[in-house]
Image (cartoon, helix red, strand yellow):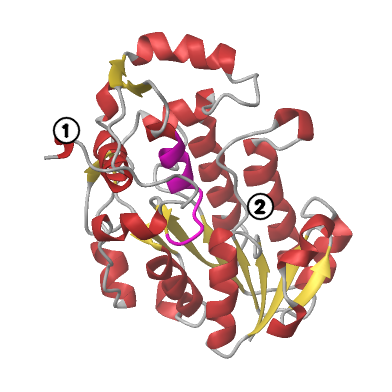
Amino acid sequence: MKILVTGGTGFIGTALRRALKNNGHDVRLLVRTGSVDKVDPREGFEVVTGDIFDTHACLRAVAGCDAVVHLIGIRREIPHDGITYEAMHTEATYGIVDAARRAKVRRFIHMSAIGARPDAPSRYHRTRFEAEEIVRKAGMRWTIFRPSIVFGAGDEFHPLVADLVHRHVVPVIDGGKSEFQPIALQNVVEPMAHSVVMPETQGSVYEAGGPERIKFIEIIYKVARHYGVWPNTFSLSSLVAKPVVKFAQRFPSFPLSYEELLMLLEDNTCDPAEFVKTFGVTLETYEDKIPSLCPHIYELAEPTAHHA
């Protein structure tokens, strides 16, 4: 099959494009001008240079394709650059879906996120749901994936936690009790790559999480143990944190946006039974992978008595 991948130069997209190619598909990538150097010509991917908001670029990208895999999404907004949830989730999805429909592409694989729903507190999850609705109503044979936090070499999550545990004081919102269900990169991309040729997955939404449910505060302590440090944590009420973060997010160096705070206050878990059954996935454990996920820019200290 000829398959177009959007978001194919990112953390998940890089692994997925290679999985599709390993499965024998011809893979085309829609790539922004500034990201072309992220694709090695020797790998044999076809590249269409253009912006997801450019109708003509989208039409060029989908021309002659049998399927589209749409991965574009953001965790944090940069409003002054036009990078908002509404733009990158809703509008970007509408643009590529419209082009695919006009080109009579029959198969559409869409990556969303656990928590996507119309009444979610965060605009992140609301716009994720809006994007899903665009896909569902497009008249194509669609499949939607909703993964939890995806972990693997080069992910964005663990460097953020590593930076957090090396701060002198670490505020933890509402005690860090929200639960996550981290899932390995390959446990996400392999099923997505196979779903393209699995008609039984059409019209289905798959929530994907790993075998362990772990509280955010536990992740902080496990990363801290890896480095042999003990962060000075304290619980901060979300009632206090919300106005502080809403004000401070205007400064680029502030590590958290208001929308990210709203997401942190929710559990990010699911029942992956249907996902595992459909794709025959053996879920990788998370905790023993933490040392390989943490960046090496920090020196390892000798463990302290706190780690006993």
Q: As displayed, is residue 262 above or below residue 276?
A: above
The numbered disc on residue 93 is: 2
Residue 72 visible in the current orientation: yes
Q: How far across and how far down the image is residue 34, in percent?
A: 81, 56
Instruction: Give the residues drawn in magenta, as a range.
Output: 152-163
Say which residue label 1 marks: 306
> Is 229 on the left or on the right of 25, as rendered?
left
Q: Give the residue displayed 73% in from the left and 84% down from the top.
A: 42
Residue 255 shown in magenta: no
Q: In which quarter of the image is the N terminus?
A: bottom right
Q: As displayed, is residue 26 above or below residue 76?
A: below
Q: Give the residue displayed 68% in from the left and 59% down from the top.
A: 97
Kind of element beneath mark 1: helix
Q: Dot 2 surroundings within 10 Å: few (below 14), some, or many (20 or more)?
A: many
Q: How far across and how far down the image is residue 214, in percent?
A: 23, 44
Pick the front one: 119 or 5:
5
Residue 121 visible in the current orientation: no
Amino acid type, label 2: Thr
Residue 162 shown in magenta: yes
Pick the front one: 37 or 20:
37
Q: Dot 1 surroundings within 10 Å: few (below 14), some, or many (20 or more)?
A: few
Amino acid type, label 1: His
Pick the front one: 20 or 184:
184
Q: How far across and how far down the image is residue 86, in percent?
A: 65, 37
Q: Gap between marks 1 and 2, in whole Å?
A: 48 Å
> Is 149 on the left or on the right of 179, as rendered?
right
The mark nearer the N terminus, 1 or 2, is 2
Image quadrant where residue 230 sits: top left
